[in-house]
Amino acid sequence: MTNLSRRGLLKAGAAAGVLTATGAVAGGHGPKRGGTAKIGLAGANTSDSWDGRTHSDSYMIVTAHGCVFDCLTEVAADGTLVGELAESWEASADAKTWTFKLRQGVTFHNGKPFSADDVIESLNLHTAEGAKSAAKPIVSAITEMKKMDDHTIEFTLAAGNADFPFLLSDYHILMYPAGQIEEAIANGIGTGLYKVETFEPGVRTIVSRVDSHYKDGSAGWFDSIEFTAINDSTARMNALMTGQIDAANRVDFKTEPLMRANPNITIFEVTGNQHYTFPMLTNVSPFDDMAVRKALKHAINRQEMVDKILLGHGAVGNDHPIGPANQYFASDIAQNSYDPDMAKKILADAGLSDVSVQLSASDAAFTGAVDAAQLYQASAKEAGINIEVVQEPADGYWSNVWLKKPWCACYWSGRATEDWMFSTAYETGVPWNDTQWENARFQELLLQGRAELDTTKRSEIYTEMQMIMSEEGGTVVPMYANYVDAHSNKLANSGTIGNLWQMDSSRIAERWWMA
């Protein structure tokens, strides 16, 4: 067996692009216990629950992951992979067999001791009959879970996977108490730093700090946290500027200058792999026609979107999901540029004219999504393509529009590794494949890259996959968006901000404190 310490498997500094926030530690002092943090978040829905399999937007990811619940592993703020409920792991030479040592002395909020049984039952949730879990591709790759003792598990994979410990940090793969999972999902019972006091889906969540937690002295500094659902960006920014909340995600770029002028507010911005997309269902006409997809990729003015929607807080995308913070990001492949004449020629060569399509959008997808759709509409008109923008309600957008309407606005936070991103959203048959795109060569390369341990060969594989997606895939990726959040001077942090997701990789509850 190859011994891989918490930091020794891979450096997410290469895989996830470690960046630090500007400025010193807020408040100028180290962490201290105490106080109640008030956090306002977009991305809430009335259908929200503590079922990690269903989490798809920022509100539940922040309140569950690294707050009420734990995972087996965690990508730290500096980008390294560390253990959470797992202490260490070892791999066989072919990366098909992994042995995990679990942390001892951990209890759930209801007093039940944490053990290997909880891990096995929690993982099986994602492959249960009828389960619609975005983590199903990760868990279904496990062919056997063997309990060696109460705190040791051996995982056997169908094929070697060098990224396996990274994948177990996925925010969907939360640990629940065996035999009590329904109760745990109903009431929010985890092993996390905070226990649930109040949970009103789509409205607010109140949590309080757990006594004698295994992370005492290293994380979890607030006495309590009040999370308020504020989906409207203007209301969220106003709440921060008037002191009703201490932190907010998804800064509205239109009001950013006002916020920067406020001496009591700090903007924190990091570049990660977050990308804004317009996925098409490629099994639905006219998106089943590659000529239509290619024409649409040349009918969008990407730089205009970066300038007008992100106000410069991002970079132009190239119709694949691998971001500039990924290890194998292929920056030198041909760029799909705005070229109305080329779009017209592609359609004419295919015998198509007067192409008319509907594009569903809501600012629930990303701040400025409706405006972005309208910009797309205007630029596509120059290519002879008629786009009807359908403005959808914010509430229920992810359950009623995404994965259901033929073409819509969407965002992805990206993932720490290429295989993780591809297998989450582009592997055949996975629940979150929001284009239903099929390409035999792409799927062949996906399996090759996953098991390949040679860095040079992996680079070649992932470069080809990005090229195939950019040319033939069903996703238009116009831009990568920086994570831009804000906090008042009442809160402090280490100065190093995680860049996997919003709000310090969604672990603001764990890592921040009162100044």
Image: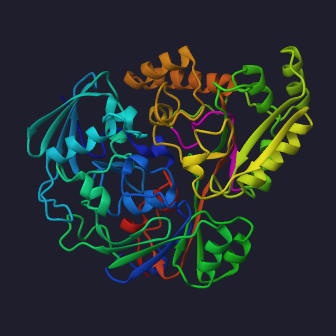
Q: Position of residue 416 (x, y in %)?
A: 46, 42
> Relative to 367, is 426 above or below?
above
Asked if one can make out residue 69 in the rendered structure from this viewpoint, the answer is: no
- The quarter holding residue 139 reads top left
Q: Start and end of the magenta stretch?
A: 313-326
Q: Residue at point 52% right, 81% down?
A: 489
Q: Which residue lies furthest to the left in this view?
A: 149
350 above or below 245? above
Residue at image location 36% in from the left, 34% down from the top: 138
Left or right of residue 197: residue 275: right
Identify which residue, 338 or 431, lies in the foreground: 431
Left or right: residue 477 compared with residue 430: right
Q: Main secondary structure of the magenta part?
A: loop
Q: Residue at x 40, y 22 (%)?
A: 454
Q: Which of 263 and 370 is in front in this view?
A: 370
Task: Give the residue drawn at x 54%, y 63%.
Answer: 21
Q: Quadrant of the N terminus?
A: top left
Residue 447, percent across and down? 43, 20
**Can you say whether 289 is above or below 173 in the image?**
above
